[in-house]
Image (cartoon, rainbow, N blue to C red):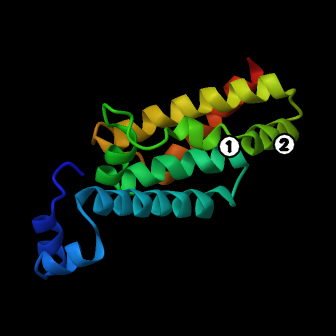
Amino acid sequence: MAAVNARSVAKALNCSTQPIFSYFSGMDDLKNALDQKAHDVFEQTVSEEAKDCPALEGSSNAYVRFATEQPRLFAHMFLREDGGMQSFGSELAREPMITAEASEKGLDSEKAKRVCEDVMLYAHGLAAMQATGRTNFTQPQIAQRVHEMHEMLLKK
């Protein structure tokens, strides 16, 4: 996103910079709109994937899928030095996720919170490696790894 400027956006849209500045009050306004769109794309990816399996695993798989399919957007959102947008952990560490994990697995809230945090840390590592090209796992391989880690953490 650091490379985003009015000229690069105008070039991508095949227009002059005038329409951009007539719609946005300045570059900060444009970057905020782009950040919001990135967040919306992320939320859509997570919500689509999360409905197919247990909440924690579904959300974790979607997070890694997002990193695989949108590596630059993922890096902008989650790998920036300034922390970027909200971390994946804060995205998933909402009370509903912990409550769902406790209910699905029959855990007390502290154990559910710990399992959620640890699975999210694992998923973030996988996602970062996928986004940076260090690994090239398929979605089924990712789902299997997340599931196995989840199961190991439940036994801990």
Residue in the image at 32% along x and 44% along y: 75
Residue in the image at 38% along x and 40% along y: 84
The label on residue 56 is 1
The correct choice, above or below, for 18 with respect to 76 in the image is below
The correct choice, above or below, for 126 with respect to 114 in the image is below
Return the residue nearer the eye: 153 or 39: 39
Q: Secondary structure at mark 2?
A: helix
Q: Position of residue 48 (x, y in %)?
A: 60, 64
Residue in the image at 28% along x and 55% along y: 28
Q: Which numbered disc flags the more N-terminal residue, 2 or 1? A: 1
Name the amino acid type tagged 2: Glu
User: Going by the picture, which residue comes out furthest to the top?
Assistant: 156
Label total for image = 2
On the picture, is 5 further left or further right than 82? left
The residue identified by callout 2 is 104
Q: What is the distance, in whole Å, between disc 2 and disc 1 at their CAs? A: 10 Å
The correct choice, above or below, for 116 with respect to 92 in the image is above
Q: Position of residue 106 (x, y in %)?
A: 89, 34
Q: Residues within 10 Å of mark 1 (few under 14, many from 20)?
A: many
Residue in the image at 47% along x and 46% along y: 64
Tag 2 and tag 1, C-beta contact below 8 Å: yes
Q: Position of residue 45 (x, y in %)?
A: 52, 61
User: Going by the picture, which residue comes out furthest to the front?
Assistant: 25
Return the residue nearer the eye: 90 or 153: 90
Return the residue nearer the eye: 14 or 56: 14
On the picture, is 100 further left or further right than 73? right
Name the amino acid type tagged 1: Leu
Give the quadrant of the C terminus: top right
The label on residue 94 is none
Q: Residues within 10 Å of mark 2 (few under 14, many from 20)?
A: few
